[in-house]
Amino acid sequence: MIGNRLLAYLAGTALAAIPAAALGQDTVRLGGVASMSGAGATVGNVARLGWQVAVEEINAAGGIGGKSVELVLGDSQTDPTHGVAEVRRLIGNEGVVALLGPITSQETIPITTVTTQANIAQISTAASPDLTPQAAPYHFSNSPTGLNQMIPAIRYAIDVLGVKKIAVISDNGGMSKGAVSEMTEYMTEQGAPPVIVQEFAFKSEDMTPQIFSMRNSGAEAVLLINSIGDDARKFLQNMDEIGWDVPVLGNLTTSNYAVGNARILGEEAFEDVYGVQFVGMTFCPGDAVGESPFAKYAALAAEKVPDLEKLGGAAALAPFYVEPWILKAAIEGAGTTEGKDVAAWIEANAATMPNVLGQLHADQTTHFLPSEKALAVVRSPHVHREDGLVERAQCP
């Protein structure tokens, strides 16, 4: 299990055991805030399950510094204002010492003000470029920025598919808006500026107007960047309904929810659909089956989570599953739960932390743990090998 690898690593560090005074309580209370209700409830439930699987495994392996871990949940209701109130409750009333989540950037950005004031370390999947170490010094993201997610897709579209007329469509969330601006600049530098940029509302009911506009622009491929699996499904459904058949290259959301979306839409909706995925969750022909850290985690998730495939498979839970493990490594490594010290430890040691996604990185200029080098384009993201891995579109 990935947990055993982490424990073996930490056992060799000087601060693997936390003095009792460092935590000040009998259990380590980790807060977890996500959209348990509201427009983002589907992914909020996935986050909860990913955290719970990790916490259960961490406790089975001895907890954090020998102390049992308790997960205390808060519901942001997909509302930044309510999310801030929930985090204040988790810190002030529930006594949590670190925070998991939330999921979207528009929720995370105001919440980092609370965690910074409270000197609380925070790990989320938010990917807005506004989440700099200067703005949120104790916050880290295990998602790449929107631009870094899409650089492999942009390069694949230009270099491999040979297209130059590329459309961009995104949701109206903070991560996506920031990504579109940076992507436009990057694509222009590569000699292939977007022929059209379209936007849809979070949890959209219909994207056909935007799709018709992209088709009329003469686009030969579409870059899709969004935050929730429901929107990826609606986009592919609407593409199929109007009969527009061009390559679609999606971000991590497209890949992580492809299994569940293909069950609803049918596999034909994923023809000529590519996604971006963490290298640790991919394989090339000839790679051993079941031997990678992600493959072992996927087997654990299948055992622990009922109807896992309906939720999008192990890939959907993975970004959330790694978050408690990151906090465990950092708290034990720093010997304290103080946000400032935990953040400094992550900056110095991120690259050495075993995890199911691939090699991480952090420093005083970026707290986005994966870079574009940790990502690869995958073909048929809805088709997983028996050990949960998806095939890379390009292999050595």
Image (cartoon, helix red, strand yellow):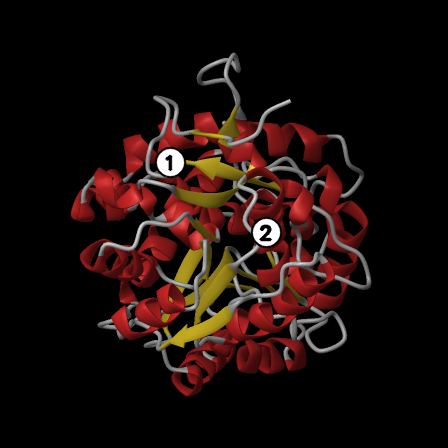
**Front one among 386 and 161:** 161
User: What's the residue at 54%, 36% (across, down)?
Assistant: 356
SS at badge 1: loop
Name the residue furthest bottom: 81
Q: Position of residue 89 (x, y in %)?
A: 44, 80
User: What's the residue at 65%, 75% (across, down)?
Assistant: 130
**Front one among 161 and 262:** 161
Q: Position of residue 80 (x, y in %)?
A: 44, 82
Q: Position of residue 169 (x, y in %)?
A: 44, 67
Quadrant (top left, top right, bottom left, bottom right) of the C terminus: top right
Say above or below: 288 vs 363: above
SS at badge 2: helix
User: What's the residue at 42%, 64% (across, down)?
Assistant: 227
- Amino acid type of the residue tagged 1 in the rendering: Ser
Mark 2 crowd level (few <14, some 14–19, many ≥20, 10 Å Cα): many
Q: Quadrant of residue 35?
A: bottom left
Which label's residue is closer to the chain start, 2 or 1?
Answer: 2
Mark 1 crowd level (few <14, some 14–19, many ≥20, 10 Å Cα): many
Q: Quadrant of residue 303?
A: top left
**Front one among 214 and 56:** 214
The residue indicated by pointer 1 is 380
Mark drawn on residue 148: none
Say above or below: 155 vs 184: above
User: What's the residue at 72%, 46% (across, down)?
Assistant: 350
Q: Position of residue 66 (x, y in %)?
A: 58, 42
Whether tag 2 and tag 1 are in contact, CB under 8 A, the answer is no
Q: Quadrant of residue 242?
A: bottom left
- Amino acid type of the residue tagged 2 in the rendering: Ile
Is residue 141 toward the left or the right of residue 276 in the image?
A: right
Is residue 164 toward the left or the right of residue 266 in the image?
A: right
Residue 159 seen in render: yes
The residue indicated by pointer 2 is 154
